[in-house]
Amino acid sequence: MKTDLQQLKQRFGIIGNAPALDRAIDVALQVAPTDLSVLITGESGVGKEFFPQIIHQNSLRKHGPYIAVNCGAIPEGTIDSELFGHEKGSFTGALSDRKGYFEVADGGTIFLDEVGELPTPTQARLLRVLETGEFIKVGSSKVQKTNVRIVAATNVNLVQAVSENKFREDLYYRLNTVPVYIPPLRERPDDIVLLFRKFASDCANKYRMPAIRLDEEARRVLTAYRWPGNIRELKNVTERISVIEEKRDVTADVLKVYLPNLNMEKYPVLVKSAQETDQKMFSSEREILYQVLFDMKKDVNELKKLVHDIIEGNLQVPTIQNGSTTTYAPIHQASMPTMSASSIQEAETVEEDEPMSLEEAEKEMIRKALEKNNGRRKNAAADLKISERTLYRKIKEYNLE
């Protein structure tokens, strides 16, 4: 059994010996010969995309088509056409008939990644396919049949999405016939060094350079870090160090430079509350706006405190002497215009009476994300913690093309 498991890991490029990982592979192998629907869950970057391939290649459908669909990357207006096809003239731009993925994959397997991003009307169509194998093309009235095996994956908490009426309960139970949970990297500490060595070796072979090595303290830092981006983040960090650092022996101090948001006095991996904070995902657009407004209020409060300290003479500010030398002198009450308590309160009231609206805050945040990523919508959506489809809709709504 262990020999077969190792051979399968080598075949699909899976690194690690964690019991939870082995359990996930074992469940995938057991369910593969059946036609049961499988729901793969796990955080972003844990490698969920390998498991549908394991299921398909070990099923009776292995000689049939295998199609992977990223539901979060398809705009809401076209996703029904992509999945189920359309008839000529059914909408603007439909210049000919088109087969959808469910028609093309007949007799094979469809992998629906980010299934939690599906809009509600599409969820109803998908439910019908799961229950009866029937679907209707966009713009058609003819019912068609398909015989596909559906494997879905998500990093969204679908139970919470069901309770918030964002995901159909009946579809959730249909998809979740057999659940497969992929553990995050922080639950596989012994696998982190193995993965680092594999990525370092691959990078060395690719760029024809010696592979980097970790000293003992660096290994402790590597396994203590909680890796919120999981395997994808570990690979990126390994490749950056391999290319940028001249020395092939990596110390803890060097490694720390490449680990973002690392508190070296108390590793976040050891603090449960920090885990929950770092893993916070924005489940709705409203939460994003609330976060923006909260940050703005925090900045305003800090500015008020700074102004108060200057007025009271508790803070030194820079002054220029002789046009070149900068010295620091305290600001005294006598050297500044007197501001009464009522004046300060009135100024604060003006600030609070003119808040930025939710729509303006959202528009500004999207605009800055697009500027930061040079118009690359996929990267902007990742920064905003929303799907590309939602970003497309908001860009059109706010005329940010």
Image (cartoon, rainbow, N blue to C red):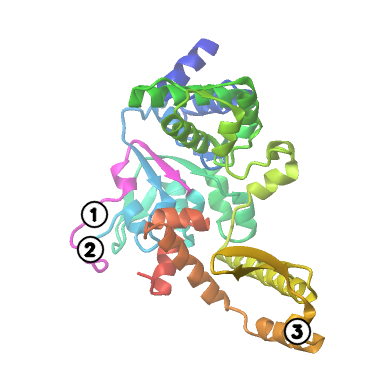
Residue 327 spot, x, y in % from top left: 65, 64
Q: Nearer the viewer, mark 1 or mark 3?
A: 3
The relative height of residue 236 versus residue 319 in the rendered view (above or below) is above
Q: Residues within 10 Å of mark 3 (few under 14, many from 20)?
A: few
Residue located beneath label 3 in the image: 344
Q: Quadrant of residue 244?
A: top left
Residue ID for mark 1 = 98
Left or right: where 30 falls relative to 392: right
Q: Secondary structure at mark 3?
A: helix
Local SS, label 2: loop
In the rendered image, residue 20, in percent from the top left (x then y), is placed at 62, 27
Residue 374 sits in quarter:
bottom left
Q: Is residue 106 left or right of residue 286?
A: left
Q: Is residue 148 magenta?
A: no
Q: Is 351 placed left or right of 372 in the picture?
A: right
Instruction: Tell me the quarter of the image containing the C terminus.
Output: bottom left
Q: Amino acid at mark 3?
A: Ile
Q: Main secondary structure of the magenta part?
A: loop
Name the residue: 76% across, 74% down: 308
Q: Between residues 147 and 372, which one lies in front from this camera angle?
A: 372
How many other residues sit within 10 Å of disc 2, few (<14), some (14-19) or many (≥20)? some
Which secondary structure, mark 1?
loop
> Which segment did they paint magenta?
89-114
The residue singled out by tag 2 in the image is 94
